[in-house]
Image (cartoon, helix red, strand yellow):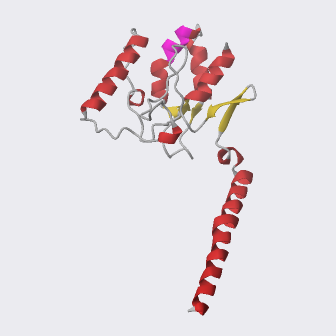
């Protein structure tokens, strides 16, 4: 029996060091060298201060800002510690009420806007943290933001085009706009 315990303990110690220390340190080191920005959280700085991450949405509610996709996280929106959707189906009364409230808020913010409201402005994603919205959602808000900031809508469209990301490799996903990056660029425009 003694002869079986010693090799088992030795194997446990060797594998713990290999898989628990060396492998994580090696993959982290490679990640920091090859994918430095992503490995460090894709943080965005403004005036040498971290203001967010390009991977996590933020709550913008002022009329002079583009609003992102609603967040279903609690106790606050875009809470990375509580990532997850509401898990409400389309026929759930709570989901219907939430969507109706969001539609009302969009109409109240810009009563003259008669465009169809893009779905990503009234429904939360599966993670509740999406940092991007569709170009259609940006275009829906363009006149409100241009009016609030007293910016020519054509100038604003050019800025939006600059921050519109194409589908990955040209075929995967859809075009999208990172709301935080666009709103920070708007603040610089002042």
**Left-right relation of 121 to 8:** left
Q: Quadrant of the N terminus?
A: bottom right
x 45%, y 27%: residue? 136
**Main SS of the magenta segment?**
helix
Image: 155 above or below 90: above
Start-end of magenta stretch: 142-148
Determine which quarter of the picture holds residue 100.
top left
Determine which quarter of the picture holds residue 55.
top right
Determine which quarter of the picture holds residue 31.
bottom right
In front of the other: 14 or 3: 3
**Left-right relation of 26 to 121:** right
Image: 75 above or below 12: above
Q: Where is residue 93 in the image (x, y as percent from the top left)?
A: 24, 31
x 71%, y 62%: residue? 26
x 40%, y 17%: residue? 106
In front of the other: 40 or 103: 40
Q: Where is residue 25 in the image (x, y as percent from the top left)?
A: 70, 60
Image: 137 above or below 89: above
**Left-right relation of 30 to 133:** right
Q: Position of residue 11 (x, y in %)?
A: 63, 80
Q: Position of residue 111 (x, y in %)?
A: 39, 9
In front of the other: 98 or 166: 98
Residue 73 lies in the magenta stretch = no
Residue 144 lies in the magenta stretch = yes
How many marks the image carries: the answer is: 0
Residue furthest out toward the front: 2
Image: 134 above or below 159: below
């Amino acid at each position: 029996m003694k002869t079986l315990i010693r090799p088992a303990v030795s194997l446990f110690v060797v594998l713990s060091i290999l898989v628990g220390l060396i492998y994580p340190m090696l993959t982290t080191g490679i990640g920091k060298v090859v994918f430095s920005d992503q490995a460090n959280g894709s943080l965005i700085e403004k005036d040498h201060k971290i203001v967010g991450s390009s991977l996590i949405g933020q709550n913008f509610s002022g009329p002079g800002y583009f609003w992102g996709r609603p967040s279903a996280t609690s106790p606050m929106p875009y809470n990375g510690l509580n990532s997850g959707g509401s898990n409400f189906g389309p026929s759930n009364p709570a989901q219907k009420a939430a969507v109706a409230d969001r539609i009302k808020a969009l109409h109240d913010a810009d009563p003259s806007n008669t465009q169809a409201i893009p779905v990503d402005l009234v429904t939360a994603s599966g993670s509740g943290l999406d940092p991007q919205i569709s170009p259609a959602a940006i275009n829906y808000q363009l006149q409100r933001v241009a009016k609030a900031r007293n910016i020519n809508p054509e100038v604003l469209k050019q800025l939006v085009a600059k921050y519109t990301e194409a589908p990955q490799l040209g075929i995967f996903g859809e075009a999208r706009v990172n709301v935080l990056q666009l709103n920070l660029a708007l603040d610089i425009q002042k």
